[in-house]
Image (tube, helix red, strand yellow):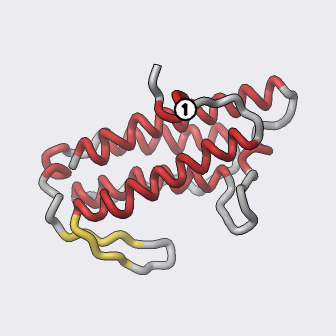
């Protein structure tokens, strides 16, 4: 359970941070404000890039915290600037790396409740939370962030997404 949560989220959050760095470099090379990238969205009713990063962090923080039976770190209000998003990613990584492995590993059959933004609580076992909700949500938002940057012209390849060297 620890490897399927912390062990999965941390490296991909680091990769997401690298994607944003490449977005900044791209904007600087082409002499436009990198914040322009953060407002991009694939469809009018979808989250923009900043919100995609915010949601990836939220799922990476909340799921392992629920498994560890601890309160998730309070992330600051979502800002539409690259430095703020990088700080959010760093805070997320620091928090989830601090969570106790034994508690998370013991959570597969434990009942947990994920609270949606509207206050609705969804019941899961720890295993179901990870495998059917939080991990798919996390990767949806990371992939969408990657796609938005690629669509903007940022030169990214699959190894940027996967983090393989």
Where in the figure is residue 135, as x and y percent of width and height? Answer: 38, 54
Q: Residue 67 lies in what quarter of the image? A: bottom left
Where in the figure is residue 48, as x and y percent of width and height? Answer: 68, 56
Residue 59's place in the image compared with 7, above or below, is below
Residue 39's place in the image compared with 109, above or below, is above
Residue 44's place in the image compared with 161, above or below, is below
Picture mark count = 1
Q: Decide if residue 74 is on the left or right side of residue 152.
A: left
Q: Residues within 10 Å of mark 1 (few under 14, many from 20)?
A: few
Where in the figure is residue 103, as x and y percent of width and height? Answer: 16, 51
Which residue reaches farthest front? 158
* Residue beneath the point at 37% across and 63% down: 133
Q: Residue 120 lies in what quarter of the image? A: bottom left
Q: Decide if residue 8 is on the left or right side of residue 109.
A: right
* Residue beneath the point at 81% across and 23% down: 29
Where in the figure is residue 84, as x and y percent of width and height? Answer: 62, 43
In what element is the residue under mark 1?
helix
Which residue reaches farthest top? 165
* Residue beneath the point at 76% across and 35% down: 153
* Residue named by callout 1: 158
């Amino acid at each position: 359970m620890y490897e399927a949560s912390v062990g999965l989220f941390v490296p991909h959050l680091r990769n997401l941070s690298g994607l944003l760095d490449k977005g900044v470099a791209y904007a600087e090379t082409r002499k436009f404000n990198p914040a322009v990238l953060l407002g991009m969205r694939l469809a009018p009713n979808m989250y923009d890039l900043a919100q995609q990063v915010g949601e990836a962090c939220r799922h990476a923080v909340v799921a392992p915290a629920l498994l560890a039976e601890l309160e998730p770190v309070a992330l600051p209000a979502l800002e539409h600037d690259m430095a703020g998003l990088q700080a959010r990613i760093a805070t997320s990584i620091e928090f989830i790396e601090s969570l106790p492995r034994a508690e998370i590993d013991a959570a597969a059959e434990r009942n947990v409740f994920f609270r949606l933004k509207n206050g609705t609580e969804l019941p899961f076992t720890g295993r179901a939370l990870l495998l059917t909700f939080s991990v798919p949500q996390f990767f949806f938002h990371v992939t969408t962030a990657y796609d938005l940057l690629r669509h903007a012209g940022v030169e990214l390849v699959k190894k940027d997404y996967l983090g393989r060297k």
